[in-house]
Amino acid sequence: MTPTTPIIEFRDISKNFGGVQALRNVNFAVPQGEIHALVGENGAGKSTLIRICGGVYAPSSGGLRFDGRGVNIRNVHESRAAGISIVHQEIPICPHLTAAENIFLGHPLPRKNGLVDWNQVNGRARALFDQLQVDINPKAVASRLSIAQQQLVVIAQALSLNSKLLIMDEPTSALNKEETKHLFKILHQLRRQGLTILYVSHKLEEVFEIADRITALRDGEYIDTILKSEATPDNIVRLMVGREVDNVFPKVHHQPTNAPLLSAKNLTVPGLFEDVSFELFGGEVLGLVGLQGSGTSEVLRAIFGHYPHLLGELKIKGDAVKFRSSLEAIKHGIAYVPADRQIEGLYPHMSVRDNGGLLLLRLMAKGPGWISLKQLSQRMTAKIKQFNIRTASVNAPITSLSGGNQQKVVIARTLSTDPLIVLLDDPTRGIDVGAKSEVHQILNQLTARGCGVILVSSELPEVMAMSDRVIAMYRGQVRATLNHTEANHEVVMGLATGADVATMTGITA
Ligand SMILES: Nc1ncnc2c1ncn2[C@@H]1O[C@H](COP(=O)(O)OP(=O)(O)OP(=O)(O)O)[C@@H](O)[C@H]1O
Ligand SMILES: [Mg+2]
């Protein structure tokens, strides 16, 4: 490896949280002016390392060198002042401030006659957005911006501060393909301008597309740094996991039931989707594919009782049902994993047991208000084992888990009710390669048991590989239903992007 000047050096960094050792003597350096990927399984310590750079946590021992000198970063202001800008794994910015205010938060603001000169603040913000070639209104309130736009606000802030290091913790987990492409273009542009980027991702294709060098952490320890040009997907996975992970998509096809479990006829929620009809059989995975805004996620939510004004007909095992709430859907054997697990999925002030056992509480209630906490703990302990969830105990606060492990708690909870029909919205987003194949195994177990699964995923290869049949949606409507022999990547993508069905070979819509 050619010697290069490091922008940041991690020196013997350890971090303990009570009994949990999140980082153990981590030593490595990120060379200046490159895009450096940081990879590792859920709970490997990536976010903890980043939070240390941002002054959110102090290391238990060891320290940082930044731009050639030892630094002691105690809070976000010191981190920014040193030249570090961070897009965190969770919500990146202050939701109630405007885009411009977020950029200049903590800067001395330009003043005129003793008052803040808002015209100048907004003008400067606009200039930064222009530089990034994005169309964001500086006066827009941040909570109204999309996640992609919020990230761009932080990047604009990095530019305004002349930051030397931009750190992004799984920035694309909530972005669609277009937004991801745009982000990569900007990151390449910033690197050409000399900015160093430390980039955390579970998506290996992304890492290969964007990184110059890749560092792997495992169980809180530094494993190795390799040049992208010398890396292969297999050896990266081996560095992360410490063993071979075979067949990422181990699909098993089962004989579907003769009668449908669920039939949907002309389902419509005005403005979201219309006339969606399909049947779901026991033993099959039905993939729903569509771009953002195509209505796929909304169809799942509708089946789960999120839209009381849902029109059309829904039948379970032949009986017409109408759900006014999700609880009614659960009672009919339906389970749902939402895409936005942070917002829809978790209660931050509660423990792993209570977050995971939330649905069990209802089912296990003995009498009004009485449940056995011991039994609940036992069942959650079993789930933690089954899903390989890394947590100090069932009583640990959910927020003490790494992002990916929090997601596994939501998935475990969903499946804890022994459902008949399982609705999964992007179940493997943000979880590591090992956990991904665990989720795929679980899909196989569910269908082997006769469950019907509807799968929405932002990763087309995943839906294609794991589904028995695929429905392509475009702008709220079903374009075609294909079985796995006729569904290939181009055809499904074509349908989902609105290509003309007649021109596509062998497909009858
Ligand atoms: N505030 C905290 N209190 C207790 N334990 C914590 C805390 N923050 C992190 N941990 C633990 O430290 C370990 C590393 O977590 P971290 O969030 O750094 O992982 P990660 O590599 O970012 O994982 P992911 O890919 O899932 O986001 C985990 O075992 C986690 O449970
Ligand atoms: Mg993380």
Image: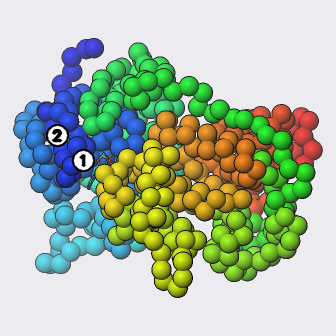
Question: Alpha-carbon neighbours of circle 1 within 10 Å: few (<14), some, or many (≥20)?
Answer: few
Of the two numbered discs 2 and 1 in the rendering, the one whose residue sits closer to the viewer: 1
| Numbered disc 1: secondary structure | strand
Which residue is nearer to you in this view: 298 or 94?
A: 298
Given the current orientation, which residue lies at the most extreme bottom position?
368
- Give the numbered dot on residue 20: 1
Residue at 60% across, 27% down: 247
Question: Alpha-carbon neighbours of circle 2 within 10 Å: few (<14), some, or many (≥20)?
Answer: many
Coordinates of residue 353 in the picture (x, y in percent): 41, 62
- The quadrant holding residue 316 is bottom right
Which residue is nearer to you in this view: 46 or 144?
A: 46
Q: Is residue 32 visible?
A: no
- The quadrant holding residue 300 is bottom right
The answer to whether residue 206 is above or below residue 288 is above
- The quadrant holding residue 293 is bottom right
Q: Is residue 104 visible?
A: yes
Instruction: Say whether mark 1 is within 8 Å of ligand 1.
Output: yes
Relative to 390, is 84 on the left or the right? left
